[in-house]
Image (cartoon, grey):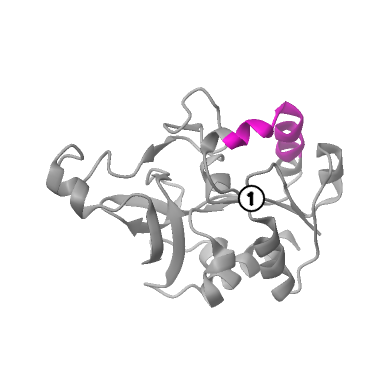
Amino acid sequence: MIALVDYGAGNLTSVKKALAAIHAEVYVPASPREIARASGVIVPGVGHFSATRALDPSWRDAILARLGEGRPLLGICVGMQWLFEGSEEAPDCPGLGVLAGSCFRLGRRIAGGSADDAGSRDALKVPHVGWNSLLVTCEAPAVEGVSPGSQVYFTHSYAAPVTGEAVAITEHGQPFASIVQRGQVSGVQFHPEKSSDVGLRILRNFVETAR
């Protein structure tokens, strides 16, 4: 049974439909206490990082307790960014901190040039919206069965840094982590529920891990 966390910033309907398409059992916990029965937890998210303030200490403690029991956690889009220590989008709003590093605004660090350069600004469209490819960098449960160069659907202005936890990288003016995994913690910057068969495969990988 997968717990889909509703903190007012996620496209829950689409994610629930995608999970139903792969025959996953899913429920939306009304309180942190209800996460206790979950075999896995998904934290979705769209919009501004500050929306994660709604995940107060009681939610954080409940999610961390499930991780401590070996139950997997998946973050989607802003939910993935929340797995890190924080984001430039809301510097006073801490992330969960299970992954090291801070999320940054696309266009701030463009390889071979300056984000302040007018030409660079014109060339780089932010927010990054639409289909882009995945460069899978290593084997991990999250990317099992995902073909090199697979296209997935993004919509975001901030992104996670490429660290040792990045198992797939995407380029948009600069490289960023599009899929991360460390142990039972995983995250995707794109929207798997809008990414056709590739997105469903990644959700299926998570559900299989939870089982």
Q: Residue at x 33, y 44 (%)?
A: 106
Q: Quadrant of the C terminus?
A: bottom right
Q: Residue at x 45, y 55 (%)?
A: 155
Q: Is residue 22 visible?
A: no
Residue 194, image x, y percentages: 55, 67
Which secondary structure is most common in the magenta stretch? helix
What number of labels is visible?
A: 1
Q: Is residue 136 above or below residue 55?
A: below
Q: Quadrant of the N terminus?
A: bottom right
Q: Is residue 38 above or below residue 145?
A: above
Residue 15, image x, y percentages: 66, 62
Residue 175, image x, y percentages: 31, 52
Q: Residue at x 74, y 32 (%)?
A: 61
Q: Is residue 85 above or below residue 197?
A: above
Q: Secondary structure at mark 1?
A: loop
Q: Which residue is mark 1?
A: 10
Left or right side of 115 for 90: right
Residue 57 in magenta?
Answer: yes
The magenta span reads 51-65
Label 1: how many Cα within 10 Å (few below 14, some 14–19, many 20+)? many
In front here: 186 or 103? 103
Q: Residue at x 51, y 42 (%)?
A: 81
Residue 52 in magenta?
Answer: yes
Residue 182, image x, y percentages: 54, 48
Left or right side of 137 for 114: left
